[in-house]
């Protein structure tokens, strides 16, 4: 085989490289990037025309809840990863709060095996911390495909809630890798629950789970993280106060923002979407959205996720507080972010840093997150000029809804390639599931 023969060539695209954009053909061999910049004479088993498209490193959504095992009528790993590749996402990190939850070696082994039979994209798996599995966490976090430990310090039920300082400290002293936190303050949530009742509008959700809940939770976690020296990743930071506070903790803390908090705000979201705006932490007002965008621009944010967390449509139509918290988003994450790029809210290179390199850096992913020779041949090919309205008929998740329905966006995924396999092109899923567990340092 000649040096200039490849399994796949992406021809004519504009590559978003770590140092900037360049027109270059990309050659793929054995699932990895073999060359960037090819002579016109290079040949391949398959050539994908990328003229007019931007070739991004595969987008990583580091925050999804694929509900598997759980309710396949809402979402599952086969359907959720299909939604991911339709949306231009090549890797997802899946949360452990399934039914049953992923909190021990046996359930983790089941999931590791299952993923590699049915997933359309690559996956990382979170393991949930509980008050009783602390002795096992150090071993579990080193499991194949494990992206880290997830702690629900507020806003969960049953086994997965770890809300008190003593338990949190035990979890922090249990291993070495960065821990991911949901950090609303459970005590304040419970203390104020009685002030809110049926009959209130959906926006009551935001008043109950207020800024103070988020700030108290984050401040307490960071004090504990400092005492233990254990690095922390704060998921879905949602307030201006938290963003200002974490600036002094950069040696220990990395920060995730959600596309929802960058795109939808109160009161409009609650008026327009009702229960389809209810999530945790809640969608908040203009001051917090402005702080989030400022943090994207000043470099103090590390990752952007979707927090894809589907519920049945009928449940989301219930009045507050019976309507469950959680929105969809793995399929709309990239189109909505590309629209923000086109609107001038962030440069394309910054978006790639937040959605490809950032998750790889924070979670220690091996071989993903940048276009470079020797790295995985994961690509999100996007048409930056394409205009389109997000429609629910496009949504692959069985729940069938998106809070972004009717939004006109500029920028759309044109093809998704996972380790050299073209798994989506022009809104069509191709071939068979090729997903593997991602590798971590
Ligand atoms: Zn979540």
Image (cartoon, rainbow, N blue to C red):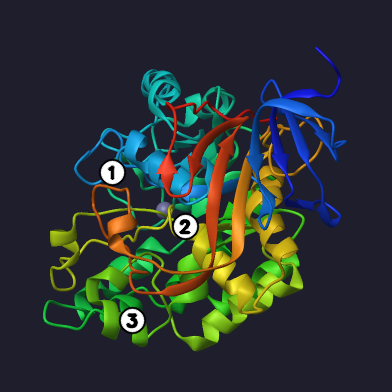
Residues 162 and 403: in front is: 403
Q: The C terminus lies in which quarter of the figure?
A: top right
Looking at the picture, does residue 265 appear above or below residue 132? below
Which secondary structure lies at badge 3?
Answer: helix
As drawn, the label of residue 207 is: 3
From the image, tell me which residue sits under label 2.
Answer: 306
Please give the name of the residue rendered at 30% of the width and 41% of the height, measured from the top-left corner: 67
Measured Cα–Cα span from mark 2 to mark 3: 22 Å
First reached walking from the N terminus: tag 2 or tag 1: 1
Q: Nearer the viewer, mark 1 or mark 3?
A: 1
Residue 228 x, y percent position in the rendering: 66, 45
Looking at the picture, does residue 292 appear above or below residue 99? below
Q: Is mark 2 within 8 Å of ligand 1?
A: no
Asked whether residue 441 appears in the rendered view, the answer is: yes
Say few, some or many: other residues with alpha carbon within 10 Å of mark 1 (under 14 / 14 to 19 / 20 or more): many
Q: Nearer the viewer, mark 2 or mark 3?
A: 2
Residues 401 and 213: in front is: 401
As drawn, the label of residue 3 is: none
Residue 259 x, y percent position in the rendering: 50, 66
Marks 2 and 1 in Cβ contact (< 8 Å): no
Left or right: 411, with 185 as reference point:
right
Please give the name of the residue rendered at 58% of the width and 38% of the height, measured from the top-left corner: 417
From the image, tell me which residue sits under label 1.
Answer: 75
């Amino acid at each position: 085989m000649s040096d200039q023969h490849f399994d796949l060539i992406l021809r004519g695209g504009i590559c978003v490289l770590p140092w900037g954009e360049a027109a270059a053909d990309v050659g793929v061999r054995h699932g990895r990037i073999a060359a960037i910049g090819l002579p016109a004479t290079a040949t391949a088993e398959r050539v994908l025309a990328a003229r007019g498209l931007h070739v991004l490193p595969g987008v990583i959504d580091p925050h999804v809840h694929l509900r598997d095992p759980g309710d396949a009528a809402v979402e599952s790993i086969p359907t959720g990863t299909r939604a991911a590749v339709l949306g231009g996402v090549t890797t997802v990190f899946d949360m452990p709060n399934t039914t049953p939850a992923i909190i021990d070696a046996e359930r983790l082994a089941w999931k590791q095996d299952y993923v590699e039979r049915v997933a359309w994209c690559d996956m990382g798996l979170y393991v949930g911390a509980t008050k009783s599995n602390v002795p096992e966490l150090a071993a579990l976090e080193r499991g194949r495909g494990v992206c880290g430990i997830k702690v629900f310090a507020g806003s969960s039920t049953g086994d997965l809630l770890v809300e008190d300082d003593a338990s949190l400290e035990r979890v922090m002293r249990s291993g070495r890798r960065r821990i991911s936190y949901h950090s609303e303050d459970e005590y304040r949530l419970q203390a104020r629950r009685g002030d809110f009742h049926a009959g209130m509008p959906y926006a009551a959700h935001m008043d109950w789970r207020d800024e103070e809940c988020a700030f108290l939770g984050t401040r307490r976690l960071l004090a504990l993280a400092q005492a233990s020296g254990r690095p922390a990743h704060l998921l879905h930071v949602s307030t201006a106060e938290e963003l200002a506070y974490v600036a002094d903790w950069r040696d220990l803390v990395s920060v995730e923002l959600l596309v929802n908090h960058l795109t939808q705000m109160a009161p409009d979201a609650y008026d327009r979407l009702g229960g389809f705006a209810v999530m945790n932490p809640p969608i908040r007002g203009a001051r917090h959205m402005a702080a989030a965008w400022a943090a994207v621009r000043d470099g103090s944010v590390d990752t952007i996720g979707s927090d894809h967390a589907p519920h049945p449509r009928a449940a989301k139509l219930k009045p507050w507080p019976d309507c469950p918290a959680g929105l969809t988003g793995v399929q709309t994450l990239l189109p909505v972010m590309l629209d923000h790029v086109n609107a001038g809210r962030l440069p394309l290179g910054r978006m790639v840093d937040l959605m490809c390199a950032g998750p790889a850096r924070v979670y220690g992913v091996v071989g993903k997150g940048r276009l470079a020779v020797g790295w995985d041949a994961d690509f999100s090919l996007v048409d930056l000029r394409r205009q389109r309205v997000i429609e629910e008929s496009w949504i692959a998740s069985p729940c069938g809804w998106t809070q972004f329905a009717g939004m006109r966006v500029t920028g759309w995924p044109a093809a998704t390639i996972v380790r050299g396999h073209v798994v989506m092109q022009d809104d069509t899923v191709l071939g068979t599931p090729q997903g593997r567990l991602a590798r971590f340092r």
